[in-house]
Image (cartoon, rainbow, N blue to C red):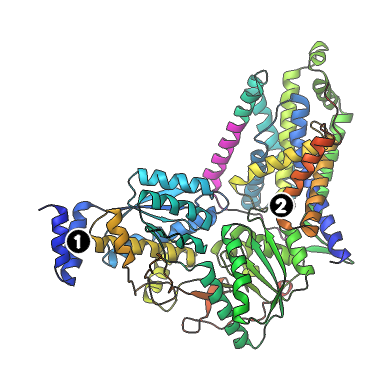
Amino acid sequence: MDRRHLLASGAALGATSTLVLPTRLLAATGPLKVGVILPRSGVQAGIGQDCQRGVDIAGPILKAMGMPDLQILSGDTESKVETARSTAEKLIGEGAQLLIGAFDSGQTTAIAQVAEQKGVPLVINIAAAPQITEQGYKFVFRNFPTAGTILANAFEQQNAIFKQVGDAPKSVVFMHVNDTFGTAMAGGIGALMPKFNVPYKVIETIPYDPRARDLSVEISKAKASGAEALLCVSRLNDAILLTREMIKQRWTPKAVMSMGPGWYEDQYLKTLGKYSDGPLTFSPWYDPKKKLSQTLVAAMAKSFPGVNLNTNHVFTFEALLVAADAYKRAGSGDPKALAEAIRTTNIADNSSMGPGIMFNAKGQNDKVVDGSVQNVGGKQVVVQPEASATAKPIWPMPAYDKR
Amino acid sequence: MSGGLYLNVAVSGLLTGLIYGLSALGLSVIFGVIRIVNFAHGEMMVLGMFATLVLFRALGIDPLLSLPLVAAALFAFGYLLQDLMVRRVAHLADHMQFLLMASVAVMLISVCLMMFGPDAQNAQVSYGFDSFAIGPLLVDKVRVYAGIAALIVSGLLFAFFHYTPTGKAIRACGDNYTGALVVGLNVRRLYALTFGIGTACLGAAGAIMLLLVDVHPYLGPSYTLLAFIIVIIGGMGSLPGALLGGMLIGVSEALAGVILQPSLKSAFSFGLLILVLLVRPQGLLGKVSR
């Protein structure tokens, strides 16, 4: 009996048997080769390295969950779209049966095209540009909200916070990076904001280069706008630069409301110390009350003392979880079988907020939701949604010159 | 927008431009005398930034105080690089020189990556978040100190080239290579000195720049490009031109950010570059080559 017949026979057995039989088969076929493509160098290196921590802690946790072994093939996008594409091709050439990546929407778009052409499943860890799962791709799956969902959740939770604290800004200045993600978010804000009746008006929009060395002009302009709060879509390095300039230019808005990465990251907290407290981030996050989140927190504390669990770790881990789960259920490393298995994913015991991991016909997990996270005392605490909150929001943000 | 905003932005741009100018001086000095284009310019400045960071973290030395040490270290690096390697390709075609300097750049990036990792790092000095307030003017203290340091270093460099026998000898080599040989100048040593002085400028600029910018190994190419824009605008080989070009870029980028869009800052620099190339190809203070 060959492997195909054995699989077919296995499928005919009951649910219990299907769990056992493929595991035996997988032991014979060996670990699934997973190409993990991240921006490990270049301008996004800090975040790419942070995502890798999610990979580093995954092995023992997946094993404890009864998942099959994964063999990780590491790839680097060098924070460039063109390198992302060639890295994906290289890893597939080296035998990767499934790809994971790649944090940045532009780079992920390039990888998605390669994955689709080659018929190798791509499980996106982080990337929010909506168009990635709107192309009719059959091999691309995303367990991360789109820009539209992030914004919708952000506006809902902002309104909830304003109600909770009994105050709201009347005007905001919107600053955003002008890369694929930033531009998609900016477009989404214009389209979605009117639907959510937020109490503020965007009185100035300031796009900027994510590789900028100096953001003093941008903050001068933001301060001069007279806005009460800062709404932003940033990356890590620019979030640090923006904060430094706000301190130097003696401008503390009522709130910094970020709808992207940067402001919650450990490097931000470590670099700025006491000045890192205060910003609110509306972003996909982990539910601190879920069991798997607590496991991940403990694993991070053990492997990387002093590093707080964050979005980068959680969603990269969950991408591996999706891969391992699909491999287990497919009982094969065949890319088509893996893609079919991913399509029927239903993982309730996950870490991110929302009911669990499942994909719609477009390959998008449309059930995953954001959390509102505030930096308090060098830690990130969840302040919304209330079901997952572990603290109340601090409002307004403490003045930089009084810390 | 208020006048205070423009004043603040212009002053900040001017101070940043002074540091850009100091960095570009390194490129201009080397090209003006040895006629080698240093394509590892930005990477050498990054090396200076990392050296400053090490001194700050290991010994707690303020970047401004470590400036002479870092400049001296980079001087030695540049001197040896010229004498051991660059000298051997100086007579070859331009593309061979380019390949050598580009290789040096790649090696410097790799060494920094291995030693310091890819993360952006900074030296957090006690006055790092302070600013001076004079009426409506609010100027970042770090930028003021950095600008003053850049002016002092540039002044010392001008004085060296104009008032010391060695400086005059170096200028003579740049003006007339054959003539310098005929009158018995030790051109090999003077070239090595020149390259060393150029890289010392980068060390000084790196020490100052660390106060303003987080350093990571991939920072170099953008500063190489910036230095090229500055020296082409100011005039290749002209020391005052480099400083003027730096200030012009600093102020114009800053004002363009306010008047137009911040994301158009770089486009504005390149626009200025194209304008200068069309109207005055030798640069604002450059000499017409014959």
Amino acid, disc 1: Pro
Q: Picture quarter containing residue A93?
A: top left
Would you say B209 lies left or right of A162 here?
A: right
Residue B112 belongs to the span the image colors magenta: yes
Q: How far across and down, in percent of the image, does residue B27 sit?
A: 74, 34
- Residue A93 appears in the figure: yes
Magenta residue span = B102-129
Image vertical order of residue A163 relative to residue A326, above or below: below
- Residue B137 appears in the figure: no
Q: How many neighbours does mark 1 have within 10 angstroms: few (below 14), some (14-19), or many (20 or more)?
A: many
Residue where numbered disc 1 is placed: A22
Q: How far across and down, in percent of the image, does residue A140 sit?
A: 40, 59
Image vertical order of residue A343 relative to residue A4, above or below: below
Pointer 2 chain: B
> Mark 2 or 1, which is nearer the eye?
1
Tell me whether the residue at label 2 lies in contact with that at label 1, contact meaning CB atoms closer than 8 angstroms.
no
3D distance between C-alphas at marks 2 and 1: 62 Å
Amino acid, disc 2: Asp
Residue where numbered disc 2 is placed: B62
Q: How many neighbours does mark 2 have within 10 angstroms: few (below 14), some (14-19), or many (20 or more)?
A: some
Single out the residue that lies furthest toward the top.
Answer: B182
